[in-house]
């Protein structure tokens, strides 16, 4: 598994403890196995915040950071019989492997937690995690009952999630390097799909090519469910059934990305099943591409996050007006959000350990300024429902989206998903090489 350095995890824990009041203790867990059916479980994926602070990939573990900044991991013990059936466990070796100060078995969690929390001022944990919340309340109640024996229960709680969200919104060089590797695996998969597609294939056959390329290149996890949407299916934003036949003359929208070292990639491309855009498809596609470039120019340090979306909206609305899908004055159409009949989502989102990564988009009610190290998607689109009788029939059932993963830098924005064509001529050229 692709792995970041232990020093990075340690620096994150140090940064976290500098963000909370002295005398605070942090508690979080990674989660357990989830049943798929009967006695079979889904492959385990660690909680993103837990992994962000520890790098530890196993299930059923807790991480605590005490008031002195020391990290304590509670995990399943080495057990040769269980490992024969269920796979390797790190056990005590996790201390050296992941730079953890102390590793204990999960069975010792309650006793150790009570010792760490006795005299602490505050417990910092993810409020949304009901299991951790119940544990914390139980520990605190026990300390309250021991007050006559001299125990001092923490007096306050603090939600861990917002603190880590702000830390995670700025990526390190190591993270960006790993994300680029994930992005480039996804680029290879999209290029392969463009090369092999033929009319009369099934959407799931094209999806199989994506999954093959992901795994062949070292990624065993999807960042999200693949979208392989042909024809009017592309107008369903989260279409994942991928079961229809791809017809000659249709466009195909593929939104697919792999995960590497638990970091996500996220790419969308739209291309013709037969390798050639028709006039209507090309006209709408060019509007989306122009909107992409307009949004791209706003991805600069100091620009408001929403500036990219606003620039894309203006280009899309103007394009729809020029092609006759909208009627009226440009400014009025933008103000009334008339474009939302054809473009109903934002132009991007943070990406990282989660494909829709954490981090506020507004600070004090205002769109936050972009900073170097932020990683986000840029994904304008146009979707014309097949049932929209207000437009000419040639436009109906066309769905188009173009999406890349982009790093904000002190100079030009850097496209992690480089090497995958967006221009009409470049797409058609790639597809002609069957």
Image: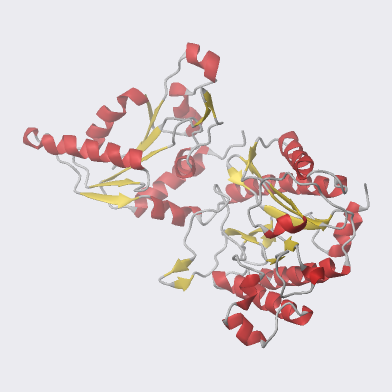
In screen coordinates, is 358 left or right of 322?
left
Q: Quadrant of residue 251?
A: bottom right
Q: Residue furthest top?
A: 81
Residue 430, percent from left and from top: 88, 53
From where the camera sits, is residue 151 visible?
Answer: no
Direction left: furthest residue:
148
Q: Is residue 389 above or below residue 329?
A: above
Q: Is residue 390 above or below residue 47?
A: below
Residue in front for this viewpoint, 434 or 336: 336
* Residue occupying the point 48% across, 40% down: 51
* Scheme of image coloration: secondary structure
Please tell me which residue is depicted at 58% across the width and 41% down the height of the picture: 262
| Residue at the image position 25 percent from the left and 28 percent from the top | 111
Residue at 56 percent of width and 71 percent of height: 306
- Farthest residue toward the right? 433
Pinpoint residue 266: horizontal percent, then vertical percent: 66, 52
Instruction: Indicate the quadrant containing the N terminus: top left, top right, bottom left or bottom right.
Output: top right
Viewer-side residue, 355 vs 90 = 355
x, y percent for residue 277: 87, 63
Q: Is residue 170 visible?
A: yes
Between 304 and 194, the one lying in front of the other is: 194
Answer with the quarter of the image where residue 192 lies. Answer: top right
Looking at the image, residue 104 lies above or below residue 253: above
The number of numbered badges drawn on the structure is 0
Which percent across, then down, holds residue 341? 64, 71
């Amino acid at each position: 598994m692709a792995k970041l350095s232990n020093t990075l995890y340690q620096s994150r824990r140090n940064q976290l403890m500098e963000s909370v009041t002295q005398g605070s203790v942090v508690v979080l867990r990674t989660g357990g196995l989830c049943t798929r059916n009967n006695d079979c479980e889904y492959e385990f994926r660690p909680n993103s915040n837990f992994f962000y602070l520890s790098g530890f990939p196993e299930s059923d573990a807790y991480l605590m950071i005490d008031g002195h900044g020391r990290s304590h991991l509670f995990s399943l013990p080495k057990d040769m019989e269980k490992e024969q059936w269920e796979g390797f466990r790190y056990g005590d070796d996790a201390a050296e492997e992941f730079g953890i100060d102390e590793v204990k078995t999960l069975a010792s969690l309650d006793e150790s937690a009570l010792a760490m929390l006795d005299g602490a001022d505050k417990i910092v944990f993810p409020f949304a995690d009901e299991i951790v919340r119940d544990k914390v309340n139980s520990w605190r109640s026990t300390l309250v009952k021991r007050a006559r024996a001299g125990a001092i229960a923490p007096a306050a709680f603090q939600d861990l999630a917002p603190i880590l969200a702000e830390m995670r919104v700025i990526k390190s060089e190591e993270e960006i390097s790993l994300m680029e590797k994930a992005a480039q695996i996804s680029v290879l998969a999209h290029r392969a799909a463009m090369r092999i597609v033929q009319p009369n294939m099934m959407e799931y056959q094209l999806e199989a090519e994506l999954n093959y390329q992901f795994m062949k290149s070292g990624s065993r996890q999807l960042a999200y469910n693949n979208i392989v949407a042909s024809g009017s299916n592309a107008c369903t934003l989260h279409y994942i059934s991928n079961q229809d036949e791809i017809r000659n003359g249709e466009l195909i929208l593929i939104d697919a990305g792999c995960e590497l070292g638990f970091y996500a990639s996220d790419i969308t491309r739209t291309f013709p099943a037969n390798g050639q855009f028709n006039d209507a498809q090309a006209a709408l596609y060019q509007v989306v591409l122009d909107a992409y470039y307009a949004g791209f120019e706003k991805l600069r340090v100091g620009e408001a996050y929403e500036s990219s979306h606003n620039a894309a909206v203006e280009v899309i609305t103007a394009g729809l007006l020029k092609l006759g899908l909208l009627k009226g004055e440009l400014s009025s159409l933008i103000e009334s959000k008339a474009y939302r009949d054809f473009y109903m989502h934002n132009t991007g989102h943070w990406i990282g350990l989660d494909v829709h990564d954490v981090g506020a988009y507004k600070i004090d009610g205002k769109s936050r300024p972009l900073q170097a190290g932020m990683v986000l998607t840029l994904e304008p689109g146009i979707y014309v429902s097949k049932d929209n009788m207000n437009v000419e029939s040639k436009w109906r059932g066309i769905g188009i989206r173009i999406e890349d993963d982009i790093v904000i830098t002190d100079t030009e924005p850097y496209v992690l998903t480089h090497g995958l064509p967006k221009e009409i001529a470049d797409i058609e050229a790639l597809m002609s090489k069957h």
